[in-house]
Each structure stands twice: as C-alpha cells, then as structure tokens.
Image (cartoon, rainbow, N blue to C red):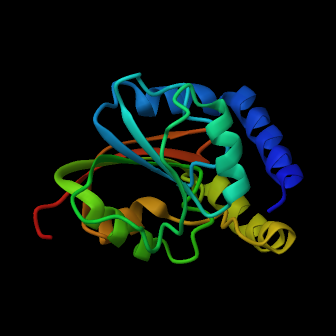
C-alpha cells in the first residue's frame, strides 16, 4: 500500500468517526490498562483513547498505515510491527488485552487469528472487539447478505456478513458483554479466555 492509499484510508476512518464509531471506540477501550496488543491497528484511530500507562503494541498487515499511526502517537517508541494476525510474531502469554476494531471483516481466516490471539493472551486476558457484522435484525441481515457480494467484489477484503460473535465463541472465548449498534450492523464484544488452553 502506498502512502497516498494509507492517507485515503485514514480519511475514510475519519468519516466513520463522525458517524459515531469514535464514541463506540471510547466505550470499548474505557479503563483498558496493562500490556495491550492491537491487531489491525490501521492508521491509529484508537491511539488517543488509551491511557498513558498502557503499554501498546500495534500490528497491521499494511506498513504504510502503521507509519501514519506512529506519527499520531504521543509515544514515538510505540512498538509497531507489520504482521498478519493469523500468525502473530509473539511468544505466548504476552498480553493482558487484545483489541480489534473493524478488522475481523477482512482477516481471511478469522479462526486462525483468534487461535493466535488466544495463544498470546495471558490466562486471565481479555479480547475487546468492535466489528461490523451480519445484521442482527431481519432487515439488516437481508441487507448485509444482499450487499456482500458486490461490496467484496469492489474492494476485495471486507466481508459484510460475518457472524464474528459465533466465531469468537467457537474459538474458545467466553463473551461476557455484547451490544449491537448502528442499526444492527455494528457489534461490540468483550470476551475472556476460557480455561481449556
């Protein structure tokens, strides 16, 4: 991805922030502390929300997005690694919290990413997600199913109708809190690691 494409991506994210995503990000990340891994960090939309004592590590599959993220950070030494969430370059039990916002729609095999996240989380670690998912009402379900083929054909990575909560549970996480927003198209999830690792 070029720097120009990364900046276009960043402008698109800013439009989503005005639409209300920013409020949901703040709600998701309120009170997060400790060692945090953010997967699919993009251009750093969440960076301003974390507390100063939080130890953040960023990964994204696009290096130019990470470059923009580091420019935004008030901690220029924030670790930022170009990496695939399906194969995390970290030892096990490294992070207290893993965060993902608007990323699981574009991971080719989300179950692999969740297995990796489970591996790098501490036994009492938490997974915090804000994702657009398959609609949660009859109309929004039909809408996301109908629009998905065209949407995916146009931009090639985003799956509009994934049921991410089901995938999270199947990966061995317990969803402790879930809420639906944005006309049933956005879902916030806070999950913990089960003890069967």
Q: Quadrant of residue 118?
A: bottom left
| Number of numbered labels in the structure image | 0
The quarter of the displayed image where residue 183 is located: top right
Q: Look at the picture and state if 54 lies above or below 148.
A: above
Determine the image quadrant of residue 44: top right
| 44 displayed left or right of 122 | right
**Does residue 89 lie above or below 98 as drawn?**
below
- In the rendered image, the residue lying farthest to the left is 195
In the rendered image, the residue lying farthest to the front is 77
The quarter of the rendered structure image containing the N terminus is bottom right
Say which of 36 and 19 sits in front: 36
Task: From the viewer's perspective, tell me whether residue 2 is left or right of residue 171.
Answer: right
Looking at the figure, which quarter contains the C terminus? Answer: bottom left
Which residue: 29% across, 61% down?
120
> What residue is shown at x 67% (from left), y 35% (from top)?
71
Residue 66 rendering spot, x and y as whole percentages: 64, 49
> Horizontal placement of 92 versus 50: left or right?
left
In the depicted structure, whether residue 80 falls above or below residue 16: below
- Residue 174, given in percent of the width and then of the height, sits at 24, 56
Q: Is residue 49 left or right of residue 146?
A: left
Q: Which of 44 and 20 is in front in this view?
A: 44
Q: In this view, does 1 lie above or below 45?
A: below
The structure residue drawn at horizontal position 56% and vertical position 66%, both measured from the top left corner, is 162
Q: Where is residue 89 in the image (x, y as percent from the top left)?
A: 41, 68
109 and 3: which is toward the camera: 3
Q: Which residue is drawn at 59% across and 50% down?
A: 102
Q: Position of residue 17 (x, y in %)?
A: 69, 31
């Amino acid at each position: 991805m070029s720097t120009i494409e990364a900046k276009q991506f960043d402008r698109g994210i800013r439009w989503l922030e005005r639409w209300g995503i920013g409020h949901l990000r703040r709600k998701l990340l309120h009170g997060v502390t400790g060692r945090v891994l953010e997967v699919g960090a993009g251009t750093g939309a969440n960076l301003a929300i974390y507390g100063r004592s939080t130890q953040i590590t960023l990964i994204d599959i696009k290096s130019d997005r990470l470059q923009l993220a580091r420019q935004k950070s008030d901690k220029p030494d924030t670790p930022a690694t170009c990496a695939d969430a399906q194969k995390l370059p970290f030892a096990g039990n490294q992070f207290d919290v893993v965060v993902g916002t608007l990323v699981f729609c574009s991971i080719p095999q989300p179950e692999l990413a969740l297995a990796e996240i489970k591996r790098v989380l501490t036994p009492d670690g938490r997974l915090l997600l804000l994702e657009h998912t398959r609609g949660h009402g009859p109309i929004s379900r039909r809408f996301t199913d109908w629009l998905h083929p065209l949407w995916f054909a146009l931009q090639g990575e985003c799956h509009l109708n994934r049921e991410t909560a089901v995938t999270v549970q199947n990966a061995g996480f317990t969803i402790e809190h879930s809420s639906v927003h944005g006309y049933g198209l956005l879902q916030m999830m806070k999950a913990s690691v089960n003890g069967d690792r």
